Image: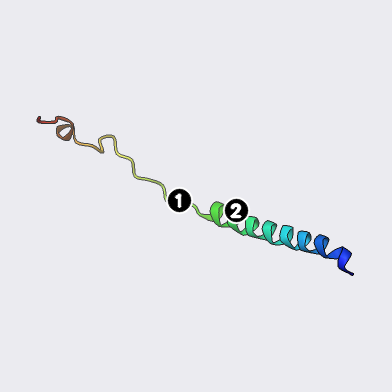
Amino acid sequence: MPQMMPLSWTLLYLFFLMLFMLFTYMNYYSHVPAPLKSSSKSIPINSLNWKW
């Protein structure tokens, strides 16, 4: 039945789009970054004095 073809393609497109978005969001939110070791002085004061 050719009348049902656009509906089928649209549903197939939406299905794969939702599947792609699901895996993308799962990949993005499943990553847990390691905590940074912050020090109070990460930049030495001497490097801030520019000698022109």
Residue 41's spot in the image, x, y percent?
A: 25, 35
Query: Which residue is drawn at the image coordinates 90% and 70% (left, top)?
Result: 1
Q: Mark 2 points at which residue?
A: 25
In the rendered structure, the answer to whether residue 32 lies left or right of residue 6 reads left
Q: In which quarter of the image is residue 44?
A: top left
Q: Vertical placement of 45 versus 19: above or below?
A: above
The quarter of the displayed image where residue 2 is located: bottom right
Query: What's under tag 2, amino acid-wise?
Result: Tyr
Asked whether 22 or 9 is in front, the reply is 9
Give the percent coordinates (x, y) of residue 26: 60, 56
The residue carrying mark 1 is 33
Q: Mark 1, mark 2: which one is toward the viewer? A: 2
Left-right relation of 43 to 49: right
Badge 1 element: loop
Instruction: Specify the farthest residue to the left.
Output: 51
Question: Could you say which disc has been placed on residue 42 in the image?
Answer: none
> How many neighbours does mark 1 have within 10 angstroms: few (below 14), some (14-19), or many (20 or more)?
few
Q: Which residue is drawn at 73% across and 57% down?
A: 14
> Which x, y percent locates residue 13?
72, 60
Q: Residue at x 82, y 60 (%)?
A: 7
Sooner in the amino-acid sequence: mark 1 or mark 2 = 2
